[in-house]
Image: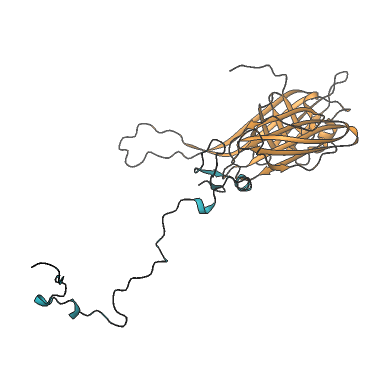
Amino acid sequence: MAEQISIAEWLCVNEFDVSGVSSNFGLERTADLEEFTCFAPPSDTAPTAIFKKRLAGVESCKVSNAGYLDMGINLPAAKAALGTSPIISKGDNRTLGSGVYMFVGKESSFSDGGEVGKVIPFSMELLSDGIVTYGSLFEFGSKTATGNGTSRTMPAVIAGKSLYLHAHVISVSGTSTPTLTLIYETSAIGDYSDAITKHTFTDFTAAGVQRAIKTPAISDLNHRFRWVISGTNPIFVVRLVAGVR
Amino acid sequence: METGMERITLVKEWNGHTPGSEVEVDPDRAEWLRENGYEMPASMITQPEPDDLTARPVNNLEEGVEESAADKVHYGEDDLTADTDPDKEV
């Protein structure tokens, strides 16, 4: 196991990647452990010791970050999104295939302000509202032409599980209405000659975010994003994530 | 079988599975296999042989005559089943 310096962490809140203005990230997952320890059973005539027993209860996830307020970039907009239910993806690095926490936030806080003569700091906190999925980073970066993403092996989506998809489009540039059609597809064989479309996102023509949940069953284990891009000199900066839980 | 899955019997090799083998796949993949001719037609799938419903019952009795218990009496010397071949040497 190799330790790593925290330098490539990233956090998307809706269509905003706040990594560029953040100097500190925190992620905390919790589960309420409910105790149900009882006396030793009647059959035990000489009990010597009992041990606490617990059931895993309600889960929660909190993401926090702090940094320096940049009024010109994206924090004002991210701040505006906090009152709603932002779609959140949080990764520890930008290597494709690395782990990403995915959830919808509900309650959060945002604060800023500082001393005279100092750079204005900010901090914010995002709490999960519902299921938290630990997914995989499929794509991170700019897409300028139609193409296929990297295929990744995913667990089968069987009864009781779902496939969660997050598509964050951070920025769009170009002329002639740059348009991104984003498709999520699977393959049983792995070469996608047998590709089946599992989800088609609504076309992106501007920065935005979409979250999709696909219910069982999905037996194919090879998954990827595919995109069709039109327009003149189009550039779409994206973070694409998928997870099964 | 896993909930939501379908079982397909393959007529040709697919994804490492030999013809005749069964695979459990989701409905989308099952549809794909059918459309691309991977599913064995039902008529080719080996089934236990059904009873021959086309066979006609054998009736050894003359029409309208019921076999009675008397018919089954052994007639001793008048045994009609005795060998009556005239050419047979005694």
Check the picture and name the quadrant holding the C terminus of chain B: bottom left
Decide which of B51, A82 is in the foreground and name it.
B51
As displayed, is residue A60 above or below residue A72? below
For residue A65, what is the image quadrant? Answer: top right
Query: Residue A224: percent from the left, percent from the top?
Result: 68, 34
As displayed, is residue B41 above or below residue A114? below
Query: Residue A108: percent from the left, percent from the top?
Result: 74, 36
For residue A63, what is the image quadrant? Answer: top right
Query: Residue A144: percent from the left, percent from the top?
Result: 82, 29
As displayed, is residue A228 above or below residue B60? above
The residue at the point 38 percent across, 31 percent down is A49
Chain drawn cyan, letter? B
Q: Is residue A104 visible?
A: no
Residue sticking out furthest to the right: A175
Decide which of A65, A184 is in the foreground and name it.
A184
Query: Residue A43: percent from the left, percent from the top?
Result: 31, 41
For residue A176, what is the image quadrant? Answer: top right
Decide which of B21, A28 is in the foreground and name it.
B21
Chain drawn orange, letter? A
